[in-house]
Image (cartoon, rainbow, N blue to C red):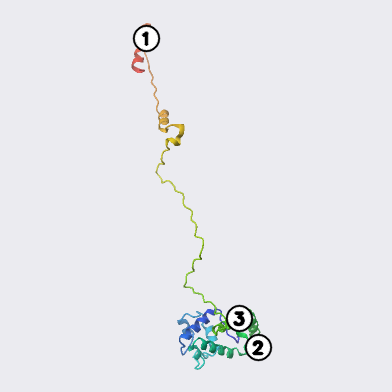
């Protein structure tokens, strides 16, 4: 088991100290952390860091005189946490006096050599140390993710383009008839249709009397022309 504690989500460590600076209970255990939704399912890693710094004992009870700096102002808190780190990480400070400001890669190498840990564990040990250093006033604190905040829309973002739908004639509605100008010289379609559809055929059957003379026939045809063809 590694000698130096670590945690994967550094934001949980920051949240823990923010809560402890408001009030330090007599016992800090998994139930206490769950009450504030700190490091869900990873409470033991936070507790291990607090125990390593001497804030609580093996049972999670607050150690009197070891957490007074949590009640202090910013300057007192920074000074007290730095002192706790120098005690807990005494071997690191003995070999690397500027450990609070050293490069992360150098810290990873040191933790891996000291604990014979994997690269992943070494990185987390170094990140945990650097987070504590930031809390003590050395460097910037890691940004905690805020899952309740909705992502803001970037300025100047392109709006979603929409293509207007083509208008479709309603079923059962007859399109308007073309105007005379649209027809040009073609004329009115109604007139053309009447000329094509209307027709008259007359069949005339004439029975001429046998033995009639030319005058009789002329009179018959003259009568037909007068009454049927005028």
Dot 2, how many residues are within 10 Å of its Cα: few (below 14), some (14-19), or many (20+)?
A: few
Q: Total of numbered circles in the picture?
A: 3
Q: Residue at x 47, y 83 (%)?
A: 19
Indicate which disc residue 103 carries: none
Residue sitting at the far front: 75
- Percent of width and height locating residue 146: 49, 74
Up-down relation of residue 227 to residue 180 (above or below): above
Do we see residue 211 in this rendering? no
Label 2, label 3: how far apart the Cα atoms are = 20 Å
Mark 1 residue element: helix
Given residues 63 and 2, the one toward you in this image is: 63
Quadrant for the N terminus in the image: bottom right
Mark 3 residue element: helix
Disc 1 or 3, which lies upstream in sequence? 3
Residue on which disc 3 sits: 121
Label 1, label 3: how far apart the Cα atoms are = 133 Å
- Percent of width and height locating residue 224: 35, 15
Given residues 187 and 195, the one toward you in this image is: 187
Dot 1, how many residues are within 10 Å of its Cα: few (below 14), some (14-19), or many (20+)?
A: few
- Percent of width and height locating residue 188: 42, 32
Left or right, 113 with respect to 19, comes to right
Q: Residue at x 35, y 18 (%)?
A: 228
Indicate which disc residue 95 carries: 2
Quadrant for the C terminus in the image: top left
Up-down relation of residue 158 to residue 63 (above or below): above
Disc 2 or 1, which lies upstream in sequence? 2
Indicate which disc residue 218 carries: 1
Disc 2 or 3, which lies upstream in sequence? 2
């Amino acid at each position: 088991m590694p000698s130096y504690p670590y945690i994967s989500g550094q934001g949980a460590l920051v949240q823990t100290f923010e809560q402890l600076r408001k009030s330090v209970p007599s016992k800090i255990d998994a139930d206490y952390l769950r009450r504030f939704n700190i490091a869900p399912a990873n409470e033991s890693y936070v507790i291990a860091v607090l125990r390593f710094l001497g804030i609580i004992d093996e049972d999670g009870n607050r150690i009197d005189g070891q957490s007074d700096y949590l009640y202090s102002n910013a300057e007192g808190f920074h000074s007290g946490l730095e002192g706790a780190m120098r005690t807990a990480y005494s071997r690191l400070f003995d070999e690397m006096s500027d450990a609070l400001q050293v490069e992360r890669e150098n810290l990873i190498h040191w933790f891996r050599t000291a604990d014979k840990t994997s690269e992943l564990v070494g990185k987390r040990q170094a990140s945990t140390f650097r987070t504590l250093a930031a809390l003590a006033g050395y460097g910037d604190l890691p940004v905690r993710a805020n899952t309740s905040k909705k992502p803001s829309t970037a300025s100047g973002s392109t709006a979603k383009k929409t293509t207007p739908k083509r208008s479709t004639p309603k079923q059962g509605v007859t399109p308007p008839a073309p105007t005379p100008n649209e027809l040009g010289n073609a004329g009115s379609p109604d007139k053309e249709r009447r000329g094509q559809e209307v027709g008259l055929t007359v069949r005339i059957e004439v029975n001429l009397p046998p033995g009639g003379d030319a005058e009789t026939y002329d009179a018959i045809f003259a009568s037909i022309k007068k009454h049927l063809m005028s």
